[in-house]
Image (tube, coloured by chain):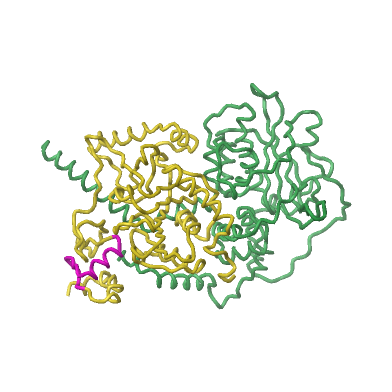
Chain colours: A yellow, B green
Amino acid sequence: MTDQAYNFAYLDEQTKRMIRRAILKGVAVPGYQVPFASREMPMPYGWGTGGVQVTAACLTPEDTLKVIDQGADDTTNAVSIRKFFQRTAQVATTEATSEATVIQTRHRIPEAPLTKDQILVYQVPIPEPLRFLEPRETETRKMHSLEEYGLMHVKLYEDIARHGAIATSYAYPVKVEGRYVMDPSPIPKFDNPKLSNSPALQLFGAGREQRIYALPPFTHVVSLDFDDHPFEPSKAPHDCDLCGAGESYLDEVITDDQGGRMFVCSDTDFCRTRREEGHVGRLGEPQFSSKKIANSFEGICAPEEAAE
Amino acid sequence: MYVAVKGGERAIDNAHGWLAEERRGDPGVAELSVAQIREQLRLAVNRVMAEGSLYDPGLAALAIKQARGDLIEAVFLIRAYRTTLPRLGGSAPIDTAAMAPIRRISATFKDAPGGQVLGPTFDYTHRLLDFKLAAEGGDFPPAAALPSAPAPVPHITEFLNRDGMIEVEPASDATPPDLTREPMDLPTTRPLRLQALTRGDEGFVLSMAYSTQRGYGRTHAFVGELRIGTVAVECDIPELGFAICIGEVEVTECETVNQFKGSKTEPPQFTRGYGLTFGQNERKAIAMSLVDRALRWQELGEDFIGAPAQDEEFVLMHSDNVQATGFLEHIKLPHYVDFQSEMELIRRLRGKALTQKEAAE
């Protein structure tokens, strides 16, 4: 079957309209999980089918799309989703956060601040923040409608009593505009502060669980905490070994079997931009051309060369 | 090293190439045709059609070939194709009483109008490997056939109905819900549960049914009737003003008759469980009817004893194998951002615990 056999951005217009309605409802009620008739997509559930459907419903031919997974543009699943939209929507794609109008992400919020002209689409595995406290959907919906979030606070309190700290490091629950408790998708809690007051529209799609929710621009989002145990975003206490950034979220990369490791920005575009600007980290090499930078990951793959 | 997961574009293309090669297998062995799969692996085709919710033996056979025989993967291919198809209209309900069955058995009556027809079944075969099949080739003599006059084959549960011995399922012309077009809204209704079960994973539905037989929500089921055959699919054509037959589908239908001593709301009578699947698929149809009956505890005024098969939310939210396999297998995707944040947390908690331990010593 040729690609022309499919509608723009794969989904038919009726389906896109149904999804846009759910998005609008989500925007009208920030943090509320809107049920929608999620379609079976040509990629598996759990691979971002919710995000893909939201992106498909938002894309116009003039858009420029960026897709990241774990902060990186070149992880296998990000490559696969970007290719899917290149094929079915023929939209322009980019790896530069600032150039994108729609960014689909899994597990990260880009380091570079977003603008009012951008939409950030999150892939969500389990949209229900209360799910692991109460497995029944019928119960959790009731809890949300009654604003009954005591169970969550008890859980956080028990964490502190047992471990001395809240033992949630990603998918850290937030409260939206003082009303709905929301799962921000499995982003590290380091990213949580970026959810609040963002000029960009943030949309969350959970395909298998058939839910869409949204944070309209400049929505007030608070990570749950206690007065005496305030929320703390955390990251590895290092600088990026390639670009030297001290304030970006880092991946830990094992470099040998002797305990050797390096820390690199998980946001590949952020790291590349910094290196192009001349920043050099502990193990980085000065970069001059972007072509060379594009190949720089091969440098990481061969540590013996980097050591020379 | 793990970073090799990055820069995946070329890796993906190459992996696809390798996959195609593996699918073909040894080029010295003749390639399997889609027609061969459709004709000779028909039960696999039936399962893919049933769980894929699409009646098309040719496409199901193609999906099985493309999926290298992985039936859940084949179901996935069919589902992904199915969503792209336009909805032209709805058919009239199929009339299974008008079926010309190739197989029809009842475990509750020795004989009944229409008779018992054993049909093509494994039931009484001895499960001995047939090495003649391994030798390939060879003509098989045609099966003996007796002439039979077509006669009506009414449903066996109808006979019970005359004496008021079995509950009556009230007729309804309401359009049934469709979980592929509307998000699942719990609690559901019986038509939606039946749709979910007939699309559900055969293994899952089988195990749920089996659990009721072993006491987790026992329903005392007998197979009142199991019938397999083709039925006409009729569709209303607005321009004509009446329904015409647009094709035939093969289905398996199972009606169980369940012992029932009565409850606070219902008199003692037999109750029903219902199973219907595309193609010949008895295991699925029987299992489906048992699970259907177990899920009806509320409308029949029975007690909820906490059995998994009674729990609508548990059964319906976990019966779909395309959803289940996707979510299960997605944990092989990179999670290093989450994992990194977990490492930071564990390091911090460990540091704290070790300091406290040292201080105590």
Residue A18: x and y in percent read 55, 51
Task: Return the residue nearer the eye: B146 or A288.
Answer: A288
Q: Is residue A274 above or below residue A108?
A: below
**Quarter of the image where the N terminus of chain B is located:** bottom left
Q: Residue at x 68, y 52 (%)?
A: B278
Q: Which residues are magenta?
A: A266-286
**Residue found at x 46% / y 46%:** A26
Query: As drawn, which residue projects farthest toward the bottom?
Result: B28
Tell whether position A269 is magenta: yes
Task: Identify the residue at the far top of this view.
Answer: B264
Q: Position of residue A14 (x, y in %)?
A: 59, 55
User: Is A46 left, or right, of B360 in this rendering?
Assistant: right
Q: Position of residue B166 (x, y in %)?
A: 74, 31
Q: Position of residue B277 (x, y in %)?
A: 67, 49
Give the left or right position of residue B348, taking residue B31 as reference: left
Residue A221 located left or right of residue A308 = right
Tell whether A17 sits left or right of B284. Answer: left
The quadrant the C terminus of chain B occupies is top left
